[in-house]
Image: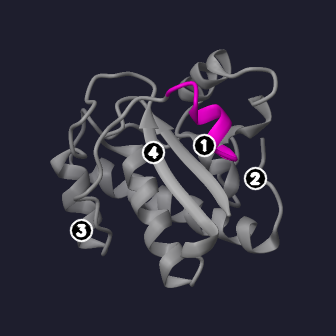
Amino acid sequence: MRRILFVCTGNICRSPTAEGVLRTLAAREGLSSEVEVDSAGTHDYHVGEPPDRRTVKAATRRGYDLSKLRARQVVAADFEHFDWILAMDQGHLKHLQSMASSFSRHKLALFLDCAEGTRGQDVPDPYYGGAEGFETVLDLVEQGAFGLLRTLRAGVTPPG
């Protein structure tokens, strides 16, 4: 069992999208019993709220159900519980690095480092833009999730 946590700022756009996409794709590939997926935010702006309605709408069009997800903030226990903590952008990664102990820093990486051709890239924040931003996030998240599933199947650790 691998435990994976996706992290963005408020846990209402990018990280819940990644959680929903990876959970769905893992189920489709028969890997549900091999992966535990969650998401959280670096800040407490939206704790307890569902994902942004535009996020939900875009995800639903592609067959991903985010309706049961609720925002939460990263807590110290996450660094113990999760095997991999994947940041949506460089700012999140730096924030997580400042929170992590020297014993858990190896668990941190950029999410898109899991996919070919996107190493070092951020998943852009769609919050202040139009609908196309949410589609771009889904494109990148799907690419990252497929890369992460390849990593899981190969039994190796993600880049970090």
Residue 44, percent across and down?
33, 22
Q: Is residue 132 magenta?
A: no
| Front: mark 1 or 4 | 4
Q: Which residues are magenta?
A: 75-84
Residue where numbered disc 1 is placed: 86
Q: Quadrant of residue 47?
A: top left
- What element does badge 1 sit on? strand
The answer to whether mark 1 and mark 2 are in CB contact below 8 A is yes
Residue 121 in view: no
Viewer-proximal residue among 23 and 150: 23
Q: Which residue is mark 3?
A: 60
In the displayed orientation, state which residue is furthest to the top.
98
Disc 4, SS: strand
Locate residue 137, reporting x and y percent: 40, 52
Estimate the spatial distance between the alpha carbons at disc 2 and disc 3, rounded to whole Å. 28 Å
| Residue type highlighted by circle 2 | Pro
- The residue mark sitting in front, 4 or 3, is 4
Q: Earlier in the sequence, mark 4 or mark 3?
A: 4
Please state which amino acid type lies under the numbered disc 4: Ser
Q: Which residue is mark 4?
A: 39
Image position of 102 with respect to 125: above or below: above
Q: At 54% across and 74% down in the image, what residue appears?
A: 32
